[in-house]
Amino acid sequence: MADGARALLGSRGGSPASSPQLGGKSRSSPPPPAPLCAPGHGFRRVTLSKPSFCHGCSDFIWGLAGYQCEVCNFLSHEKCLKHMKIPCSCIAPSLVRIPVAHCFGPPGHYKRKFCTVCRKQLESPAFRCEVCELHVHADCLPFACSDCRQCHQDGHQDHDTYHHHWREGNLSSSARCEICKKTCGSSEVLSGMRCEWCGILAHASCYIIVPPECTFGRLRNMILPPNCVRLVSRNFSKMHCFRISESLQTEPDEDEDVDGLTLGSVKDAQISTDSSKQTLKIFDGNDAVKRNQFRLISVPRIAKSEEVVEAALRAYYINDDQQHYELQTFTQQTLFPDDIINRNDATEEINPAPVFREAVPEAWIIRAKSKDHEVIRIYPGWLKVGMAYISLRIDKESTTQTVIKEVLPLLGRKTECLQNFKLVEVLMSSKQVQRMVLDDQEMVFSRLKDIRKTSIRQMNQTRFYIVENNKSVVRVNLFVGGLPPQLSAEEYTNILKDDLAVRTNLVSVSHVYSEQGAVVLEISCFSEAERIYMLAKDTTVSDKQLTALVIPEVLHTKLPQNCCPLLVFVNPKSGGLKGRDLLYSFRKLLNPHQVFELTNGGPLPGFHTFSRVPYFRVLVCGGDGTVGWVLGALEEIRHKLVCSEPSVAILPLGTGNDLGRVLRWGAGYSGEDPYCILISVDEADDVLMDRWTILLDAQETVESAENGILESEPPKIVQMNNYCGLGIDAELSLGFHHAREEEPGKFNSRFHNKGVYVKVGLQKISHTRSLHKDLKLQVDQHEVELPSIEGLIFINIPSWGSGADLWGSDNDNRFEKPRIDDGLLEVVGVTGVVHMGQVQSGLRSGIRIAQGSYFRVTLQKPIPVQVDGEPWIQPPGQIIISAAGPKVRMLKKSKQKQKKTGSLKETRMDSVSVTEVGH
């Protein structure tokens, strides 16, 4: 094995006599290599018939001025090679500091984006990581190394100091380098570097000047620091750890027969019609043969075997000398049967004669030649940062114990006992980092041989760590919701034992939320945690589906003194499905552990995660109904929070968004830069807002399910933030609600939703209810005579029906000027649909009826009622409205005009000062 970074194509040689050929004579000698090369690249001078762009400086290249890597397609001026530090994709796995798997979402079309592996533009459906800026073709996915952001501590190389996490390319064309102040981004080529924590931008030749330590940039006080989050998740995928809905995952699994290696390789090497070329199927090991996953390469018919091996290694991004590998032939009829595979394994030492066929591409399997010894790298697992390793020569007699014995003195730990250490094999695939502890008597040489037989690509992604043999405490926190409410911890334990067969010696109930019907389980066994997690998703209790979520532990004592992390709730169904894009953006800008999807367990898992955080703020992305949902959950759980009164900001995604309008967050989200939204939240002002409790005490009797006796329906309590309407206002909301239930797929835009409201209103325009005859109103214990109206509305905020001022701005000595924190509600009447339309057009205001703090409404017949947009038919009885305890803290967008900002990358760059960069 080669120790240093070696150009993959640096050893084209061998005489015709010593190298068997495919199809005949040797071809002419290749052009001379580039005089200067960046790490691992195999550069060759190329002739460009049309202008291209340099990956180093983003300027034009034309004619004979360019050099291109034959492995990763890196294109550069000769002058740029002197300063180039970007490594080739073939050695990228060896440069990963701490292996962290990526979290890939569904395949999609991404304009003006480039693949990180092959550097080509993403023209077909491709994948992107939900946590970082990695974009990759489907066929390049297996070659992406596990270099995602480390967002929590998991017991492997945990540390408190964070370095910049650099990601190459996919910057805007206006992005500027923080070092030289010149343009470093491009929409035509993969160029430029960006830290995925603080957002600093730099050229590929400039970023090495930036001091390594990252301070998280402008959003440092809003980010939940990764060293303050602990999540031990050995058996859980990244999708489970970050609570990303699995329903979005549509890409084929790596274990399925249809794989990117088979499909995508056709893109780069189509079956050639040139009679001087031949197309070969290349398998990289037994696993690829069994799954029929191959890469296609196109080579001259008279190519030597060494040149075909080089092409095969390039196809699999292997940075090694071709002399260490050989090809074995496979015919199409012998790809699948296991007996053929085993037979070839048994005879792999034999160098078979080349086989040539005209009708179909030839199938080959690339094998590593047998050696008497190997050189492996051993990484010390206790290092927090850096890339130090020990190169160790092993032979067929080397065991895990002998390797540990030889490595310890080289690491300055000669006197320590061998039993205190273990050797861990780590497979760094793009989707999952797999760790396996090797037995003390394991033959390491044989282990390497087995890995190469399975897949030489996997060998390139495998490392060996020597770690201290400390006994770690396994603790997995699992949130389980959907249980019956108002039960004790013992009763919940019995339900879980009956329905999930939990083992009480491994599982305990650490937190109980009886009002919400949820518990948090503390599990001391990985396999038991995984079993409960998977089983709960398919289990119903009392006809209600259970919800299971993996919950991280926030180490609140390690939070910086001025840290006030932002807890983000997003309703992905709001705002014309723009919530999906916001989820992705906020996961990238912040720590994904502080971003919660409301359709996956509601607000409770987020509040539980932050329950011990001394100071935090909340951002709710959704409509007014979503905001009310979160505020209601906060009211129920605030007594269990250390920060019992967090301030709440709104990103309006609904149809009306009246509360968002009042707090200056706008009429609705229309694609603003998520980074700028976070800055606005950080600069927002704290205000207080009243909340109101509505007691619904119906006089209607219902038949008891147990004994058939007629009983009074028990009172219900709902919370109100914006307004409560009775009569025509609620009737229109009810009509809209029924239309949405019939065809929910059509209600994905504010324009369509408002159109449905207009249609329902026109149907009710001639309807007369004479509401004032069907109810009585008391305000602060005084009877109030109602005028002739069709609708009665109680308003808490000066915005109704998508921004209309129902109360009006005229001065009136009978009433105080309304405020959202004055402890008073305003009561307004409307005479019908036409009056409501005039109010929304700004031509009229409502009929002012009363202002007070305690209201009693007596209904004499069933009447439509709506609270914050949620309508129903209320039977005759009493409705009592009163203040709901303490006022809630809201965040009002500051009036101060922000500095005009460009793209996300540019604005995040401003957060790093010149002194931090060390210019």
Image (cartoon, rainbow, N blue to C red):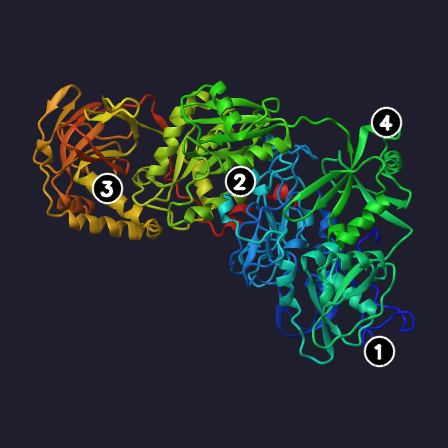
In the image, taking residue 163 as reference, residue 883 lies left or right, namely left
Q: Which residue is mark 1?
A: 25
How many angstroms separate mark 3 from mark 4 (CA)? Answer: 74 Å
- Frontmost of labels 2 and 1 is 1
Say the numbered circle drawn on residue 590.
2
The type of residue carrying mark 1 is Lys
Q: Residues within 10 Å of mark 2 (few under 14, many from 20)?
A: many
Mark 4 element type? loop
Kind of element beneath mark 2:
loop
Type of residue at label 2? Leu
Q: Which mark's residue is nearer the viewer, 3 or 2?
A: 3
Q: Residue at x 18, y 48 (%)?
A: 761
Which residue is denoted by mark 3 in the rendering? 734
Mark 3 or mark 2: name the one nearer the start of the chain.
Answer: 2
Tag 4: Cα neighbours inside 10 Å, few (<14), some, or many (≥20)? few
Circles 1 and 4: CB atoms closer than 8 Å: no
Q: Secondary structure at mark 3?
A: helix
Q: Is residue 77 left or right of residue 805?
A: right
Q: Earlier in the sequence, mark 4 or mark 2?
A: 4
3D distance between C-alphas at marks 3 and 2: 39 Å
Judge by depth and name the residue closer to the eye, 881 or 79.
Answer: 881
Q: Quadrant of residue 560?
A: top right
* Residue 504 spot, x, y in % from top left: 58, 22
| Amino acid type of the residue tagged 3 in the rendering | Leu
- Name the residue type under label 4: Cys
Residue 916, position as x, y percentages in the image: 63, 41
Q: Which residue is mark 4?
A: 417
Q: Residue 201 placed where, x, y %?
A: 59, 50
Give me the C-alpha separation between circle 2 and circle 1: 59 Å
Question: From where the camera sits, is residue 78 visible?
Answer: no
Residue 186 image-quadrant placement: bottom right
